[in-house]
Image: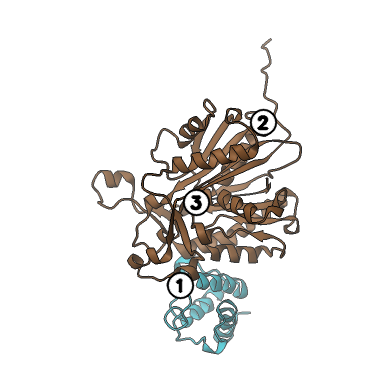
Chain colours: A brown, B cyan
């Protein structure tokens, strides 16, 4: 008879133990970018809520930002880097296609030889990675997971583009998840709709640029109004499903932390959800800009700094972006 | 029962007023959403989604960009109701 295989036994629950944040070192105001888009500070504020965005200097990579955020998260979690046994980074702006940013960051932080990989789920990436981390801990695949959303989106902007470039910023947000005696991460409601891949896209492929088909470096574009409709009304349904999966209502929430894509999305989204007044809404975009996968952890980090009373409270987080992809879950704030 | 053109105009004017504060009386068929009423693309989309609900019609994204005037929107909704 074949010897039965031993299977891993995981923790009953997982939760976020600590957070870290790294923002680009340059503070870029609206006035600094309005000329090529023939715009104004007022126009940008009115349409996006952004007053300034953080961007990284030329010699700073997304990997550097990820390392900085990861180090803070490990320290905040009260563990040592060698206890990390899984590193997942969500990014669309790694300096190279391979090796993964996660392997490099794991080594820099002292988590070598933890398994490490990058995922590509754009602005939903952090919520995807949190879902994976939670599953890994509860299945026994890992004990302490470092999740990072890291982007240097300023590498992909066209200063003359009026669709998305002026929104974008650079940063990394990190979370360490570990075993918990009580539930700390609800089931993710996540999905994709690749039939709408052109709604947020690059202007051309890297290969077309390399092969001389075009002399323009690939940069990001979006169909703003289409994204707005999807991000508010379709995502409000996803957010409501996430609350139902978590077995709570919006009355139980302490915070609402949507992807920081545009303040108008956030405001209309909150309206559609009918959030009670006590729910604190993340508006980190105002001073950070849209940092894709990094935006939710960065916003969470800032929120906890501004509102320490939120520690231990429930936060609904939802990411949505290029793909199209989306992910939402309720987490207990560290 | 399908609403008349006047009823749709009145309903649309109400939605424009709710979203932007623009007086409903200013929302006339010949007015351009962008040039005359100064409605930005995000507010326009909010009005469209609310109009879909109010008039029980579908207004796809590619149609939204072709609705230049209030009359364009009213005519679309009239046809979509049929």
Residue where numbered disc 3 is placed: A292
Please state the horizontal and vertical placement of residue A294, each as a whole percent of the image: 52, 48
Per the model, the C-alpha gap separating discs 3 and 2 is 29 Å
Residue A42 disc label: 1
- Return the residue nearer the eye: A294 or A126: A294
Q: Quadrant of the N terminus of chain A?
A: top right
Above-or-below relation of A10 to A15: above
Q: Of label 3 and label 2, which has the lower sequence position?
A: 2
In the image, taking residue B67 as reference, residue B10 lies left or right, namely right
**Percent coordinates x, y for residue A204 in the rendering:** 33, 51
Looking at the picture, do discs 1 and 2 lie on one chain?
A: yes
| Foreground tag (3 vs 2) | 3
Residue A237 % position (x, y): 64, 58
Check whether the beta carbons of the residues at disc 3 and disc 2 lie within 8 A of each other: no
- Report the residue at 25% width, 49% height from top: A213
**Location of the C terminus of chain A (image quadrant):** top right
Foreground of the two, A93 or A128:
A93
Between residue A114 and residue B21, name the one nearer to us: A114
Depicted A265 relative to depicted A257: above or below: below
Measured Cα–Cα span from mark 1 to mark 2 = 50 Å
Q: Nearer the viewer, mark 3 or mark 1?
A: 1
Label 3, label 1: how far apart the Cα atoms are: 23 Å
Instruction: Residue lying at the far top in this picture: please name it.
Output: A1
Circle 2 residue: A139
């Amino acid at each position: 008879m074949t010897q039965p295989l031993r299977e891993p036994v995981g923790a009953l629950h997982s939760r976020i133990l600590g957070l870290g944040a790294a923002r680009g070192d340059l503070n870029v105001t609206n006035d600094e970018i309005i000329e090529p888009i023939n715009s104004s500070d007022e126009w940008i504020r009115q349409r996006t809520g952004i007053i300034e965005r953080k961007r990284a200097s030329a010699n700073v990579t997304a990997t550097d930002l990820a390392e900085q955020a990861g180090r803070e998260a490990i320290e905040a979690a009260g563990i040592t880097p060698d206890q990390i046994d899984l590193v997942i980074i969500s990014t669309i702006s790694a300096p190279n296609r391979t090796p993964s940013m996660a392997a490099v960051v794991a080594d820099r932080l002292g988590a070598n030889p933890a398994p490490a990989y990058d995922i590509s789920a754009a602005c939903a990436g952090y919520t995807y990675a949190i879902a994976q981390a939670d599953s890994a801990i509860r299945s026994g695949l890992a004990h302490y997971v470092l999740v990072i959303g890291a982007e240097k989106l300023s590498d992909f902007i066209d200063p003359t583009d009026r669709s998305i470039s002026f929104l974008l910023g650079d940063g990394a947000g990190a979370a360490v998840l570990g075993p918990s005696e009580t539930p700390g991460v609800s089931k993710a409601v996540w999905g994709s709709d690749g039939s709408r891949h052109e709604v947020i896209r690059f202007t051309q492929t890297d290969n077309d640029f390399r092969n001389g088909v075009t002399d323009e470096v690939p940069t990001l574009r979006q169909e703003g109004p289409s994204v707005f409709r999807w991000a508010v009304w379709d995502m409000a349904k996803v957010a409501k499903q996430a609350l139902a999966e978590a077995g709570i209502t919006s009355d139980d929430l302490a915070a609402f932390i949507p992807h920081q894509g545009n303040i108008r999305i956030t405001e209309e989204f909150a309206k559609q959800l009918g959030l009670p007044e006590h729910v604190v809404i993340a508006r980190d975009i105002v001073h950070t800009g849209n940092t894709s996968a990094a935006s939710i952890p960065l916003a969470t980090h800032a929120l906890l700094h501004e509102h320490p009373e939120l520690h231990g409270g429930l936060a609904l987080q939802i990411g949505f972006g290029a793909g199209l992809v989306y992910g939402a879950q309720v987490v207990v704030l560290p | 029962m399908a609403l008349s053109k006047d009823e749709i105009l009145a309903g649309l004017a109400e939605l424009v007023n709710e979203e932007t504060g623009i007086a409903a009386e200013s929302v006339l068929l010949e007015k351009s959403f962008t040039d005359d009423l100064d409605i930005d693309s995000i507010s326009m989309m909010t009005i469209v989604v609310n109009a879909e609900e109010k008039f029980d019609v579908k207004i796809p994204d590619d149609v939204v960009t072709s609705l230049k005037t209030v009359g364009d929107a009213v005519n679309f909704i009239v046809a979509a109701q049929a």
